[in-house]
Image (spheres, rainbow, N blue to C red):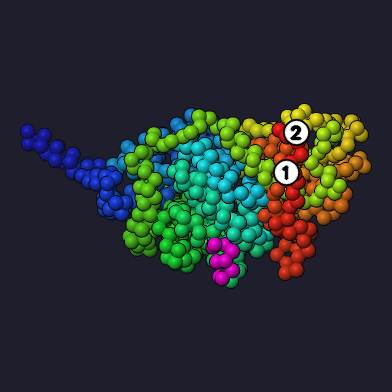
Amino acid sequence: MKRLLSIFVSLILIFGLLGCYQPVSEDYLDSSLSIEERIENLLGQMTLDEKVGQMVQGDQSKVTAAQMKRLGLGSILSGGGSIPNNDNSISSWVGAVEKYQQAAMSRRLKIPFIYGIDAVHGHNTVTGAVIFPHNIGIGAANDPELTEQMGAYVAQELKLTKTIFNFAPCVAVGQDLRWGRTYESYSSDPDIVTNLALSFMKGQQKEGILNSLKHYVGDGGTEYGTGRDGMIDRGDVVLEEQELREVHLKPYIELIENGARCVMASFNSYKGLKMHQHKYLITDILKGELGFDGFVISDWEGILEINKNTYDEKIIEGINAGLDMLMEPYSYEEAIKAIKRGVKSGAISKERINDAVSRILRVKFELGLFEDPYLQNIEVDISELGSAQGRELAKQLVQKSQVLLKNNNNVLPFKSGQKIFVTGPAADDLGVQCGGWTINWSGFTGYPLTKGTTILQGLKNIAGKHNLTIITDENNADEADVVLLVIGEQPYAEFTGDTPDPSIVGDKALSGNLDAIDFAKSLNKPIVTLIVAGRNVLIVDYIDDWDAVVMSYLPGSEGEGVASVLAGEVGFSGKLPMPYYKTVNDIKSDNPQLLFNIGDGLTTQTTSSN
Ligand code: BGC
Ligand code: BGC
């Protein structure tokens, strides 16, 4: 009896020490309490391990459910192309989220995790999702109402996969088209960026999505030559603070006032100091002056950008600068250990940890995750990805995003009875028209990895009703009345799109462009050139040979949207969201030579009915 009692007592002691048997006050689960009361109650019961777990995010490809159960990570993401079990079906995504949530909920305090992804032009990692135009095209359309609808629709597709944390909108104010992320920027004008990002976020928020604004701050304003590999992405911003505020901080100010709850730090630096360690801009300005009380997340291994010698020092520096959650896709466990060592050595204060965790918990409480961790009660109006309603919305945005720059003799829209010879490497390639961040990180080309309509297919679909004949065989090109030359850029993402030569025959251009340009010219017929690109690629050497020029940007999966404007089903209305330079030397010059100005874009009337 005595022996049994002592075994019993030591078992209780052991469990007590392991933290498995600590009494838990479940007040924080009481949704009638205020969020601040719930945070206080929960935080007061959390061990250091539990707190630090909340501060770290790993990539799904490297986190098992068992690791989630052991570490209690605050979040998990899918980076570009990170697809659960390489099975890109809705059930695979839902299964992954549920598996992690079960693991998180099996822990002592039952704190739900949150799954994050980049749905930057639609729910673009998932096969069959509607792929919308990239932001630069949305900037050309500049239609806040449709952009809000886009936000709401993308939210529907996100919710179908039980994902409510979106690393979007990108609020970069792109100033230099040599930057590979130019297409992620709505415009070079901070007001357009602010307006459209706000519309997108509102649409998402109404549907219960948590948006992460990115990349804080100055990502669109880096100096060429200061970035990765001597290029521009992840480079340095040298603007005076007032200009930094007026141009690059502006969207943050307005979106935070309108309830943005997460901000992603940028890979770039400001005046030599990496943003991931920029205490003044993160803690003093963002959290202090702007009163931001959501959480700041680091970018993908952004911790490594910090200018310190050891991993521990980088982590300490980043947390002390104000990072609350660390996107450490692969090194999440290292990150946890490093934060704990930082706390134990006194390099990171307990107050800083409590502040970071409070911010993360605040957002989770606000989202209602504690009440509905498996998102069983969220409303989803669609039952499949790529719904007809979503494709129709994307098509409208595509139509509005087409910018007509030149139109001699009103060669556009095409006229009933015309024969059109379609040529060029961007005419019939879904991957090219979708660009980067489509299924995988830098996109795809050659064969379709997702569903959609190419520009050529779109033309063929509507040719009959507009009495147009589409010719694609070079041997019959002579019969044509007009040549449609469709050229563009390769898909790319981030620094892989940086280039010293952003021309239509430069190193990011499609390799077939030049041949197609030459062949089109050799036909001695009116040429309509359609440019499928993530930026205003330089065309000054060729434009005189072309009768009409349309900047199509990266329209996404709905190629019929492009076709319908060419055919006059809808008039042209898009406007350049960034200036169109003549040469590379005009970029950021005080006295640039412009081919076209920001805001330019000819309009045409609708000429034929549906
Ligand atoms: C990009 C971010 C993105 C993150 C997660 C980073 O490389 O800079 O824009 O949200 O990856 O995929
Ligand atoms: C991630 C990006 C990252 C890139 C380069 C991709 O898989 O999604 O966020 O920047 O890899 O390492």
Q: Is residue 535 magenta?
A: no
Horizontal side of 55 relative to 517 (left or right) equals left
Residue 473 circle label:
none
In this view, the residue in front, 526 or 573, is 573
Instruction: Confirm or reject: label 2 Cβ below 8 Å from ligand 1.
Output: no
- Percent position (x, y) of residue 345? 35, 61
Which residue is depicted at the point 64% across and 40% down? 396
Q: Amino acid at mark 2?
A: Leu
Extreme left residue here?
Answer: 1
- Percent position (x, y) of residue 607? 76, 39
Q: Which residue is mark 2?
A: 459
Task: Say which quarter of the image contains residue 554.
Answer: top right
Task: Look at the numbered disc 2 and give the secondary structure of its residue.
Answer: helix
Alpha-carbon span between mark 2 and mark 1: 16 Å
Q: Nearer the viewer, mark 2 or mark 1?
A: 1
- Percent position (x, y) of residue 182? 65, 53
Q: Earlier in the sequence, mark 2 or mark 1?
A: 2
- Percent position (x, y) of residue 52? 37, 51
- Residues tagged 2 and 1 counted as in contact (Cβ below 8 A): no
In this view, the residue in front, 105 or 519, is 519
Location of the N terminus by quadrant is top left
Residues drawn in magenta: 241-250
Q: Is residue 243 magenta?
A: yes
Q: Which residue is mark 1?
A: 571
Task: Say which quarter of the image contains residue 438.
Answer: top right
Task: Look at the numbered disc 1 and give the secondary structure of its residue.
Answer: loop
